[in-house]
Amino acid sequence: MVTSRLAGGRHRLLDTVAGFRGRTIVVVGDLIADEYLFGKPARISREAPVLILRFTEREILLGGAANAAHNVHALGARALPIGVVGRDAAGDELLTLFRAAGVPTDGIVTENGRTTPVKTRIMAGGYQATRQQVVRLDREPAGELQAITEDALVARLTALAERADAILLSDYGYGTVTPRAFERIRAIARRSGAVVSVDSRYQLPRFTGITAATPNEAELEQLVGAASDDERGVEKAGRQLLERLDARLLLVTRGSRGLALLERDGATTFIPIHGTDEIADVTGAGDTVISTFTVALACGAAPIDAATLANMAGGIVVMKRGTATVSPSELGDALGGA
C-alpha cells in the first residue's frame, strides 16, 4: 500500500486540466431533476407536531446523470448526455436547463407516459441561517423502458458515442442503462478504445470489462460482504471487486477520509481529503468525482493524476450548496495552493 502525495508535478496536472477542452465525453444514465423548495420557519402546526415553513423560493437543478454531464461540461470538455425523460414538466425543465447551460440534447429520448425522476428536498432556514434539509420526496418512474424507447436510446448511442474519448455511465437504478445499451457501449469502446467509467448505485457487478468504477466505501462493503473501514480492508475488498468487474481501475470514495485508487496491474494509493472535512453539502459530489476522473483519463492522464484531480474537484464541490460543478480555474487555483 502507498500513501499518496500530490502526484507528480503541478505543471503536468495543469496541462491535463488545460487538455479537458479538447475531449468529448458521452454520459449515459438516469437523468434526474433535483428540486429544492425553500421555506422560512414560521410556527408549529396545530394539526400535528410539525414545523410550518413559509415558502420563499424554488430551485431546480440537474441531478443524477444530468449532473454528471453538467460537470463534464463545466470542466471544459464536450458533454453529450444520453438518457430518457418523460413528457412532463420535470422533463421539460431538464431539457431547458441543458440548453441554458449550452449542453446538447440530441441524445435525450422523450417517452410518453413515463415519469421523469424528481428528488424534491424541503429546505428550512431563515435568510441569515444555514438552510437544513428537512425531508426528501422522490418521484420515480414505474417499470422498464418501452421497447421503442430503448431502440431510440441505442440508436443515439450508436450515432453519438463512436467518436467519444470516453463513455461515462451514471446508473441510479431507474432503468436507463439496459443490458442491451451496455453491450452496445462495450462494443463501441472495443472498436474505438474509449475509456468506460461506471458509477452504479445498485447494480455495479453487471458492468464488467470496463476501464474504471467509482463505488463508495459502503457500496464496496456491500458488494464483497466484508468490512472496509480501514486501509487494509479497503485494499482487500477493492482487489476482489476489481477482479469481479474485470476492470482496470477502482476509485473508492471514502467521505472524510478521501479516496482510494486501486490499479489492477499496479499499486493501491490512498489520497487524503482535499481541503477541510467541515463540508457544506455532499449532494452530487460523486458525480463530480467520476466526471473529473473520466475526463482526465480521456486526456491520457496517469490514473494517479486523474484521481488527484478528482479528489480536488470533490473537495471543492462539497463546499457548495446543492448539486454543483467545478471549473478548470477552480482546479487551477487548488493546484496553486496545494
Image (cartoon, rainbow, N blue to C red):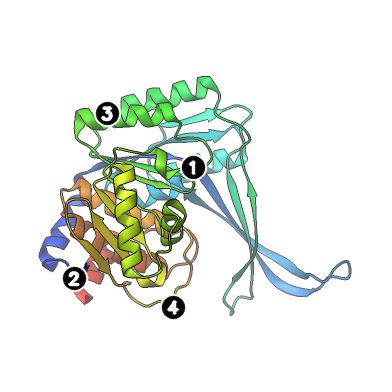
Can you say which quadrant of the picture contains the C terminus?
A: bottom left
- The residues bearing labels 3 and 1 have C-alpha atoms spaced at a distance of 22 Å
Label 2: element kind = loop
Total marks drawn? 4
Residue 75 seen anywhere in this rendered image of the structure:
no
Estimate the x, y position of residue 23 in percent, counting from the top left. 22, 43
Tell me if label 3 and label 1 are in contact, CB under 8 Å: no
Determine the CA span between mark 2 and mark 1.
34 Å
Mark 4 nearby-residue class (10 Å; few <14, some 14–19, many ≥20): few
First in sequence, mark 3 or 2: give its number: 2
Residue that label 2 marks: 6
Q: Looking at the picture, how far across and down is residue 46, in whole percent?
A: 88, 70
Query: Which of the two discs, 2 and 1, labels the residue nearer the N terminus?
Result: 2
Indicate left or right for 131 with 282 as reference.
right
Amino acid under label 1?
A: Leu
| Residue, disc 1 | 31
Query: Is residue 45 positioned above or below 168 on the image?
Result: below
User: In the image, what residue occupies the spot 17% across and 51% down?
Assistant: 265
User: Upstream in the sequence, badge 3 or badge 4?
Assistant: 3
Mark 4–mark 1 CB contact (< 8 Å): no
Q: CA distance from mark 3 to mark 2?
A: 34 Å
Marks 2 and 4, the one that precedes in the sequence = 2
> Considering the numbered disc 4 on the image, is that residue within a helix, a strand or a loop?
loop
Marks 2 and 4 close (CB-CB < 8 Å): no
State left or right for residue 165 relative to residue 171. left
The disc at residue 188 is 3
| Amino acid carrying mark 2 in the image | Leu
